[in-house]
Amino acid sequence: MDRISGKLTVFFEDPFWVGVFERICDGKLSVCKVTFGAEPKDYEIRDFINRHYYGLKFSPAVEVELKQTADNPKRRQRNAAKQMQNTGIGTRSQQALQMQREEMKTERRQISKEMREAIKQKQFDLKQQKKREKHRGH
């Protein structure tokens, strides 16, 4: 049976509060970074997740090893407290974010290249049309 887990880490990255959504699905990690601005309250984060989670743009998936967690509630509580003490984001998450940045950069470059070529073609067509109009009557 497929197992999907998600995690949100909110931390202060000067001058804004940032949230990193981590989603593990089929042993692959995808990450999305969201800037909140001012320090978000718990109910604001819950509201943001309810409204905007499905609209988030996650990074390409990265292979990750899944660890089995114990079902002991006290252990879960200790692990949650330990994770709250850790600041920053994991290296796998950083790699996934970097992959997303690179993908966005190549996409942006491709779009700008197409735009440049379209403008060049339009200018060329205008020059050709002008040439034809000059030689039309003579």
Image (spheres, rainbow, N blue to C red):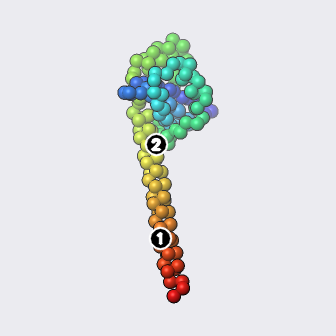
On the question of residue 82 being in view, the answer is yes
Which residue is under mark 2? 100
Picture residue at 43% right of the left edge, 43% below the top: 101
Q: Residues within 10 Å of mark 2 (few under 14, many from 20)?
A: some
Q: Which residue is mark 1?
A: 124
Q: For numbered disc 2, what is the local secondary structure? A: helix
Q: CA distance from mark 1 to mark 2?
A: 36 Å
Disc marking residue 8: none
The amino acid sitting under disc 2 is Gln
Nearest the viewer among 6 and 111 is 111
Residue at the location (51% across, 88% down)? 138
Q: Is residue 24 above or below residue 126?
A: above
- The residue lying furthest to the right in this view is 1
Q: Is residue 65 visible?
A: no
**Is label 1 in a helix, a strand or a loop?**
helix
Q: Position of residue 110 (x, y in %)?
A: 47, 55
